[in-house]
Amino acid sequence: MSKSARNAVIAVVLVVFLAACAWFARGRVHFDFANLKVQLRAVSWARVAAGVALIWLSVAIRAPRWRVLLGSASTTGTAKLLGPQFVGFTVVALFGRAADLARPYLTARRTATPVATQLAVYFIERALDLGSAAILFAITLALAPKNMPHHEEFKKAGQGALVMMAAIVIFLLAVRFAGGAVAGFARKTLRVASKTFAESVAAKILEFREGLRTIKSFGQFGSALVLSLLIWVMIAGSYFETTRAFRDSAQLASFSVPQTMLLLASSMAGSLIQLPVIGWFSQIGVLAGAYLAFFSVPVEIASAAGAILMAVTTLGIVPAGLIAARIEGVSLRDAARSSEAVSVT
């Protein structure tokens, strides 16, 4: 079954599931449309706009971080790396998580460097993203009062991010310093299923090892980590500003930084699997569920806040991405298809 066919099947299953949930909830969940109307009228659209601006800024900072991680592998300036970042995140917003490799593909084309090098940078930045989020979780947890509601869930979110970060770091170190052994193990293990596939994976691991050699100093890594922390402060700030935009909700108008980090952790878990269009609604469901379960926000306000927060953090990048695609002369659909090709070749 092709990837597009699998995505179609998953989309149908999700639609059926959501429809079943809606049918089950009818008559059981009281939805106050009058209260929703009042809440939406009181929304501070200036704070929503600030949330979008922070998302744009977080994406822009990824360009200098990518430049740092490339090291001597390319002499391309930071300005030329901005376009692929904005276009790449726009492709993900419109076509789903499967198109996430559009950024390394577009960057490879922009810098005339091997895709393997850009894939190495991509995986390193993903490790830095998880690590930065875990650091922010840990700092916030250390400063949060012990009697904070859902303190245990918050602690588990931070621990989960640390475990995922550690796993990625271990894999990166293994490939960097023992790439031949890792490639050999993959070849031997996967040969049972397919000899061709096993050889392809082994070759990619060896190419990936060469890409990882772009990081040559602790200073380079430290600079990338500082930029990563700044990126996630911007993202957290967007969640904070957008949530606090609901000025007529007692729970949301006084939203705290620790609560923001718990909401961010829930959102990260919900965005791991993101399909075109359907993923928008599943993300709204995750965010609304977090508002309901963790912060006791009324269902109508939770739904509205989840929808606006999804629009800000996921779709907010689209206008900037469309402009960048026009400047770069890139087709979003072609970039998505190229991303899928990169993931299977």
Image (cartoon, rainbow, N blue to C red):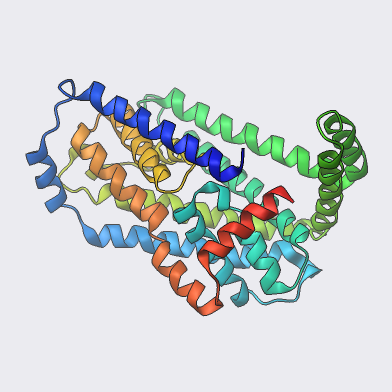
* Residue 320 image point, x, y percent: 43, 69
Compared across the picture, whether 334 is left or right of 185 comes to left
257 w.r.t. 293: above or below: below
The quarter of the picture where residue 33 lies is top left
Q: Residue at x 10, y 46 (%)?
A: 37
Specify whether residue 67 is in view.
no
User: In which quadrant of the rendered image does the N terminus lie?
Assistant: top right
Viewed as shown, does residue 173 lie left or right of 145?
right
Q: Residue at x 62, y 35 (%)?
A: 162
Q: Quadrant of residue 71?
A: bottom right
Residue at 23% x, 33% y: name it.
297
Depth check, front residue: 226 or 207 = 207
Q: Is residue 290 above or below residue 127?
A: above
The number of numbered discs placed on residues in the rendered structure image is: 0
Q: Is residue 43 left or right of residue 308?
A: left
Tell which of 24 and 80 is nearer to you.
24
Q: Give coordinates of residue 88: x percent, y percent.
A: 55, 61
Q: Is residue 288 visible?
A: yes
Q: Quadrant of residue 130?
A: top right
